[in-house]
Image (cartoon, helix red, strand yellow):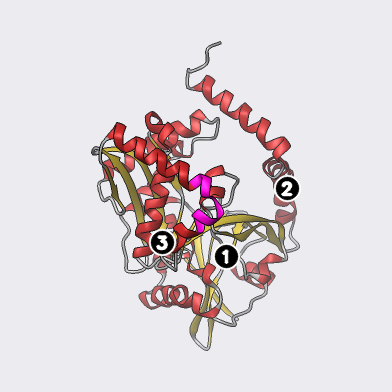
């Protein structure tokens, strides 16, 4: 196996085209998850502009690219999935039938350990290091929006009835609704980030938009547009006032739900749900196969999903002191977080506590 390691900007045009071609044809070979936009060369290139240590390993067979493995590397040889913490799909993009040895790949990349938290299915060499697998709900729209709506009416009739009732009330109270599937106004992107920051604070979560590199990444992806990839900003307006928005990457076949938010003044109308239905309708018309709602328990995801795919977390290691030290440091944190998130009797009180903390931070406490 001939493996070379490059910075994102060092990839040749031919290599990038080969990478994109592997993603475009992945569904034809039974690996639709490899078409995820978080596994695209465009995402790797954007990450390379925003974070240090971003590298791409290119494996070749008979002189031709057989696989692309994007990762981040520290000076001590600790490796992480590219965009760990914000990317919802991780792994190695490869041509059909390609197999690799995990430790050999790590050795070629100069890594003692490689950590992941959204490893996609079909990565057998890396799955040996998985410590847990988790459901990631999706919305199937390959058969069209009407087929999806029929599924919702059959599986969740109360949800459909209440959502469209809220839409009618919103029309009476807020005026005409207008949906823009691909909004190009950067001011609206900044509005979305403000909404999302406020939501993080309101619910007691860590505000991702206090991190400069995440802001830079979102803005760079917003301006990235190729035939196979774009940063998609979708906005729902009521009487020309924005009430809900979403930003996330899209490939030829998949849209990833990344940063959805809404104006709290319209919360009683569930504008986020109305927006997601319009995203599904426009995406279906655009030839998208499915919308990946992302790992994590949320009531709105349960209401919208048609099925679930699986992602894994864990790490693959070489026998190296750095690897053992990294795992010893990270394993207890992950175990505690997953124990809380996956068990309702623990998650619900923890969630209420975080929201209470958020109220205090936002100055809305009546104490």
The residue pinned by badge 1 equals 91
Q: Is residue 123 left or right of residue 33?
A: right
Which residues make up the magenta segment?
151-159
The residue pinned by badge 3 equals 146
Label 1: state its secondary structure: loop
Label 2: state its secondary structure: helix
Q: Is residue 265 left or right of residue 366?
A: left
Picture coordinates of residue 363 (x, y %)? 48, 17
Whole-angstrom CA distance, mark 1 to mark 3, is 33 Å
Q: Which residue is located at x 67 percent, y 71 percent?
A: 124
Badge 1 vs badge 2, beta-carbon distance below 8 Å: no
Our reading of the magenta stretch's main secondary structure is helix
From the viewer's side, name the closer residue of 336 and 83: 336
**Mark 1 crowdedness (10 Å alpha carbons): few <14, some 14-19, many ≥20:** many
| Mark positioned earlier in the residue sequence (1 or 3) | 1
The residue pinned by badge 2 equals 331
Whole-angstrom CA distance, mark 2 to mark 3, is 45 Å
Q: Is residue 217 visible?
A: no
């Amino acid at each position: 196996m001939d493996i070379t390691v490059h910075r994102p900007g060092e990839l040749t045009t031919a290599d990038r085209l080969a990478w994109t071609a592997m993603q475009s044809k992945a569904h034809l070979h039974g690996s639709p998850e490899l078409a995820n936009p978080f596994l695209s060369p465009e995402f790797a290139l954007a990450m390379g502009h925003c974070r240090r240590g971003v590298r791409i390993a290119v494996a070749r067979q008979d002189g031709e690219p057989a696989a692309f493995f994007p990762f981040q590397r520290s000076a001590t040889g600790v490796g992480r999935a590219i965009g760990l913490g914000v990317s919802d799909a991780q792994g190695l993009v490869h041509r059909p039938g390609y197999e690799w040895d995990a430790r050999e790949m790590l050795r070629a990349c100069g890594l003692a350990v490689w950590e992941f938290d959204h490893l996609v299915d079909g990565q057998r060499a890396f799955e040996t290091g998985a410590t847990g697998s988790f459901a990631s709900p999706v919305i199937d729209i390959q058969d069209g929006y009407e087929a999806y709506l029929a599924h919702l009416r059959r599986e969740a009739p109360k949800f459909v009835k209440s959502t469209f009732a809220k839409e009618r009330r919103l029309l009476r109270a807020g005026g005409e609704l207008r949906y823009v599937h691909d909004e190009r106004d950067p001011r609206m992107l900044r509005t979305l980030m403000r909404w999302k920051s406020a939501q993080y604070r309101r619910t007691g979560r860590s505000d991702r938009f206090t991190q400069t590199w995440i802001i830079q990444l979102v803005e760079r992806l917003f301006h990235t547009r190729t035939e196979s990839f774009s940063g998609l900003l979708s906005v729902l307006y009521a009487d020309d006032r924005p009430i809900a928005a979403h930003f996330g990457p899209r490939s030829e076949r998949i849209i990833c739900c990344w940063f959805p938010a809404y104006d709290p003044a319209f919360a009683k109308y569930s504008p986020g749900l109305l927006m997601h239905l319009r995203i599904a309708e426009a995406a279906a018309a655009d030839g998208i196969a499915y919308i990946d709602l992302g790992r994590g328990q949320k009531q709105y995801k349960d209401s919208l999903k048609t099925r679930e795919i699986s992602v894994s977390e864990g790490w693959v290691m070489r026998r190296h002191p750095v690897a053992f030290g990294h795992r010893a440091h990270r394993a207890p944190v992950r175990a505690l977080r997953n124990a809380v998130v996956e068990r309702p009797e623990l998650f619900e009180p923890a969630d209420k506590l975080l929201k209470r903390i958020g109220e205090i931070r936002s100055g809305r406490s009546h104490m």
